[in-house]
Amino acid sequence: MLQEMVNFYTCKKALKKDTPDDKKFQRHDDNCVWLLEENPLFEKPSSWNLIVQDCVKALLYLNLDIGAFDVKVQAKPDKKTNSEKWIIIESASAPSMGDVTTVKYCEQIPVVATKKAEQLGII
């Protein structure tokens, strides 16, 4: 499976409860919190595995070693398919350097560097 080829971590941007209705159309740090996948409020969509597969395919297609994808997921499952539609709306080769992302970079950069060095026959 493609997911096994990469190290994958997820977070979801969720509106704060006190966000006024006229501010809900935008999502930014002033009116949102970040939920990690382990958080019970994360609520994975039923199409989760397919979304992950598409993100991994996009990473490989773009020939990135490290990347991030913003994915917009339909709020409620489609009545016919009983699953949510989604779209990858953005890719970033240098995602934000928040606390968790910094830790992930520090873990993954040596792994990526070692793989590249092996591919080049340096080690």
Image (cartoon, rainbow, N blue to C red):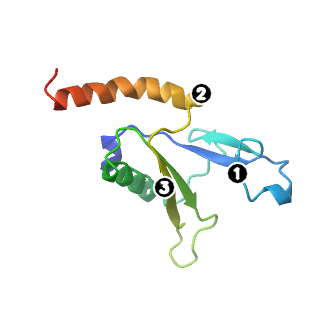
Instruction: Give 98 or 16, whichever is nearer the viewer.
Output: 98
Could you tell me which residue is drawn at 61 percent across and 51 percent down? Answer: 43
Give the left or right position of residue 110, taking residue 102 as reference: left
Residue 54 at x, y percent in the picture: 40, 57
Q: Which of the two discs, 3 and 1, sits closer to the camera?
A: 1
Sequence-wise first label, 2 or 3: 3
Give the left or right position of residue 120, taking residue 55 as reference: left
Q: Which of the two discs, 2 and 3, sits closer to the camera?
A: 2
Give the left or right position of residue 43, taking residue 67 as reference: right
Instruction: Give 29 or 85, whichever is nearer the viewer.
Output: 29
Query: Compared to 76, does 3 lie above or below?
Result: above
Could you tell me which residue is drawn at 49 percent across and 61 percent down? Answer: 47
- The local secondary structure at tag 1 comes to loop
User: Pointer 2 and pointer 3: residues touching (CB < 8 Å)?
Assistant: no
- The local secondary structure at tag 2 comes to helix
Displayed quadrant of residue 117: top left
- The local secondary structure at tag 3 comes to helix
Query: Tag 3: residue type?
Result: Trp
Instruction: Give 20 or 74, whichever is nearer the viewer.
Output: 20
Judging by the rendered image, the residue that carries numbered circle 1 is 27
Judging by the rendered image, the residue that carries numbered circle 2 is 99
Query: Tag 1: residue type?
Result: Arg
Could you tell me which residue is drawn at 48 percent across and 55 percent down? Answer: 48
Residue 48, numbered label:
3
Give the left or right position of residue 98, taking residue 114 as reference: right
